[in-house]
Image: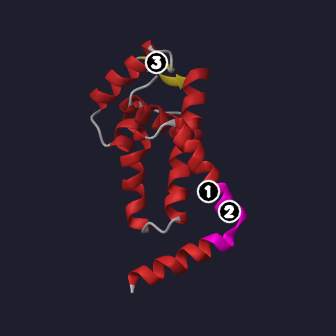
Amino acid sequence: MPTPSMEDYIEQIYLLIDNKGYARVSDIADALSVHPSSVTKMVQKLDKDEYLVYEKYRGLVLTKKGTKIGKRLVYRHELLEQFLQIIGVKDENIYTDVEGIEHHLSWNSIDRIGDLVQMFENRPELIKELRSLQEKEEL
């Protein structure tokens, strides 16, 4: 299992490849606000653990294992953002909150949050009821 730090890299690499068609060390460093040397070390570790294939000065590609995990990590991130929006967390707090909690929840908890999100999507009247409750609390 990847560590939280490894997950951040895999998720970012997956997003870069999905959006740009490739991921370079400099792109990853910029996206994660870290030094390129840190990216190189992590990419080498991810290569060793078979999440990606890295060739110095040539770039990298995710393996099937890395792609599968990357897709799941992006899903987790987007699901948590969606959940926090539904329950009324302020937009300016959502990204930071997701970054703070995403590595601390089990996949079982993520799946249960997914069930809640689906329930709210299928029954929008529940969101209205929740907003009404929140408005009363703010008074």
Q: How is the image coloured?
A: secondary structure
Q: Are marks 2 and 1 in contact (CB under 8 Å)?
A: yes
Q: Considering only vertical position in the picture, is 121 above or below 42?
A: below
Q: Considering only vertical position in the picture, is 135 above or below 108?
A: below
Mark 3 or mark 2: name the one nearer the start of the chain. 3
Which range is magenta? 118-126
SS state under label 2: helix
The x, y position of residue 24, in whole percent, is: 44, 32
Q: Nearer the viewer, mark 1 or mark 3?
A: 1
Badge count: 3
- Dot 2: few (<14), some (14–19), or many (≥20) neighbours within 10 Å? few
Q: Which mark is residue 17?
A: none
Viewer-proximal residue among 48 and 18:
48
Q: Nearer the viewer, mark 3 or mark 2?
A: 2
From where the camera sits, is residue 91 visible? yes
Q: CA distance from mark 3 to mark 2?
A: 41 Å
The x, y position of residue 39, in whole percent, is: 34, 29
Q: CA distance from mark 2 to mark 1?
A: 6 Å
Q: Amino acid at mark 2?
A: Glu
The x, y position of residue 47, in whole percent, is: 45, 16
Viewer-proximal residue among 103 and 119:
119
Q: Tell me the residue that label 2 is attached to.
A: 121
Q: Quadrant of residue 36?
A: top left
Q: Tell me the residue that label 1 is attached to.
A: 117
Q: Tell me the residue that label 3 is attached to.
A: 54
SS state under label 1: helix
